[in-house]
Image (spheres, helix red, strand yellow):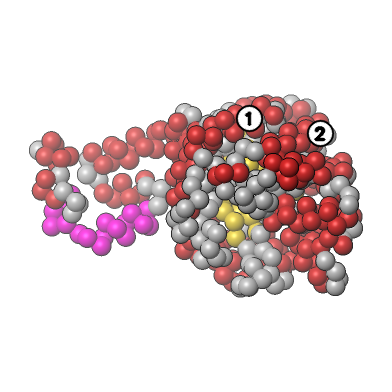
Amino acid sequence: MTQLESARKGIITDEMKASARKEGVEPEYIRKSIEEGTVIITRNKLHRSIEGLAVGKGLKTKVNANIGSSQDHIDIKEELEKLRVAIEAGADAVMDLSTGGDVNAIRRAVLKESSVPIGTVPVYQAAIDARKKNKSFVELEGTEIFEVIEQQAEEGVDFVTVHCGVTMRSVERIKREGRIMGIVSRGGALTAEWMKFQNRENPLFEDFPRLIKIAKKYDMVLSLGDGLRPGCLADATDRGQIEELVTLGELAKQAFDEGVQVMIEGPGHMPLDQIEANMLLQKRLCNGAPFYVLGPLVTDIAPGYDHITSAIGGAIAASSGADFLCYVTPSEHLRLPSVQDVRDGVIASRIAAHAGDIAKKTKGAMEEDIKLARARKALNWDEQIRLSIDPKRARELRETSPPEDSDVCTMCGSLCAIKITCE
């Protein structure tokens, strides 16, 4: 049985119990929320080396880190180091988005080494496999795409991004309305080109029951991807994006009815004042399914600092109901992220997630800040550093500028307000 089928029978699984302990909630809350479709547990039944990750309503906002090779940069050791650093920095899940080299070997190594759930975008592998067969991606048969999805499920992948909402109708809406950036999702663009060449509907939409069957067999979460997400602020909340979201809501209901867990992916680039409305719209159209958002980035003019622009948007998204934040690194739009970029991206996204949790009063979130505030009041530097979201960075900064008086820092020195009022 899947987690969802167990929940419907009133069974509290070991994964539900473990998730409840992590979240500080009752196991029955997890079970009931899975039954309602507002919480999922990401864990392929064959991926036994990890614990399941609970994502959804009333739980801490989770953070995902993307890693993976490109055709221009292939180094499996570096990708495994990114995996290690991402987990060390606090990522709750990791997606392997490799598109260069032996992507099968990279994915299997990541699955073997990871202690957190692993996600993928199977259409990337399908595109690479097409080249090996001396043909273009658009020449693939729909069945070949499903074969890749099943292969990855058999290997233990916990959740897959599938661009089922990129349909002839939604793509046509984008064309009629007009966009500055067009389609910016790689998976979305590949799917749109396949449909154009084949003059056929998206097989992942047309034969969605087959996708449900694969996911159900392995209790693999379907992450219904936003292949038509806006790639710049000016394209946000347009007809194509909303058309796709409506379709994803309908598909999510089909999967849910068959006992398959689902989450929905969302934008993207978006003006700050549109974020809350988009979160509310997704929840309404998708029956409260967990929402997984990329950022969103609140300005287009900060290349090199997009981990900051996404953290701003992520905090608002999380406070408005988003459940899962996909990190963005300083290298976004510029290059493949380095190991340090991965670390910086995870920390920025964790800050956003925590800020959102405080705003929506997630259990235990505010208590963390209160503990640090008490340590700060007591001028207990070791405890402040221990409680911080990035202790390594906090200690490095503290130790690079040691004050003469160990009770204070070099910002205020003898004029430290806390020390003055305590004396």
Position of residue 286 measured from the top left corner of the image (x, y, whole percent) = 70, 31
Name the foreground residue: 23 vs 235.
235
The quarter of the picture where residue 244 lies is top right
Q: Which residues are magenta?
A: 391-408
Tell me, for residue 281, which label it has, or none: 1
Q: Which residue is mark 2?
A: 254
The three-letter code of the residue at mark 2 reads Gln
Quadrant location of the N terminus? top right
Residue lying at 28% horizontally and 37% vertically, measured from the top left:
374
Q: Are marks 1 and 2 in contact (CB under 8 Å)?
A: no
Residue lying at 69% horizontally and 65% vertically, measured from the top left:
99
Of callouts 1 and 2, the N-terminal one: 2
Residue at disc 2, secondary structure: helix
The quarter of the picture where residue 126 lies is bottom right
Question: Is 70 positioned to the left or the right of 370 in the image?
Answer: right
Between the residue at mark 1 and the residue at mark 2, the CA separation in whole angstroms equals 19 Å
Quadrant location of the C terminus? top left
